[in-house]
Image (cartoon, rainbow, N blue to C red):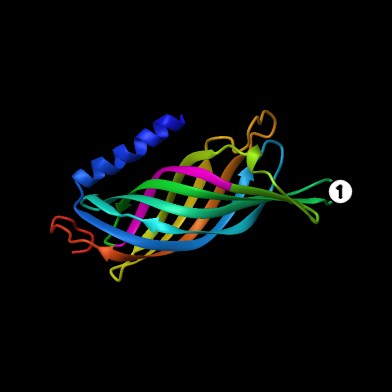
Amino acid sequence: MYVRAFILIPVLALSSLSQAQSTGLGLKGGVVLSSTKVLGQRPAPLVGGTMGLYFPWGIGPRVELQPELLATMMGAEFRGNEGAQRTLRSVYVQLPVTVKVYLSNAFHFSGGYQFGWLLHAGERLGDDQSNVTDQYRSMDMGFVGGIGLDLRSGVDLGLRAYGGMTRALRNDETLFLKNRSAQFTIGYRFVQFKRKKSFYRRR
């Protein structure tokens, strides 16, 4: 599975570059509300954050392909029967690749797939904190989808949901823990290359 993921990323990049009608580079950041899907439990969401670069490539009228490279903090909170609070925090490098379809010059729907590489995972139980990175799988993958506004000024607003398709924990045969998150981001395209006139969205 991991081999296929590493092969798919450069293939997507090369294919989009070959037919790109517009290309840009931007910096984005925002708030993440994350949790986990766990069998038989309802963990509470935690607030985190995300920041990184995004590369919008116009591949047709009202269509962009957008890879991103982000550092994201996620997590979830569990409460035991006796009120004990257990908090999980994780930090990933994420590579979402989405297709954006514009309904106007600014408003769009987006959907795609996301690859994530774990940097760190920690657990807090009461006053005790521990590093549990070795209990997590090194890679996390799943689907993303959302809506957004890309303004003429270069400011891009996005609201996106993520649903993990792979188990986050190693040797997990009981919890089937998968990452979930929603994020609101604000980005700015500080580099915008020349577009062809056939690209409708920002003539």
Q: x, y (%) of residue 143?
A: 46, 41
Outermost residue to the left: 197
- Residue at 46% over, 29% down: 1
What predominant SS class does the magenta segment belong to? strand
Placement of 200 over or under 167, stated as above or below: below
Residue on which disc 1 sits: 82
Q: Could you tell whether 15 is left or right of 113 in the image?
A: left
Is 41 rendered above or below residue 202? above
> Hey, which quadrant is residue 53 in on the image?
bottom left
Crowdedness near tag 1: few (<14), some (14–19) or many (≥20) residues, C-alpha within 10 Å: few
Relative to 55, is 5 above or below?
Answer: above
Q: Quadrant of the C terminus?
A: bottom left
Q: Position of residue 12 (x, y in %)?
A: 30, 40
Which residue is nearer to you in this view: 53 or 152? 53
Residue 152: name its quadrant. Answer: bottom left
Location of residue 30 in the rendering, given as x and y in whole percent from the top left corner: 49, 62
The magenta stretch is 106-119
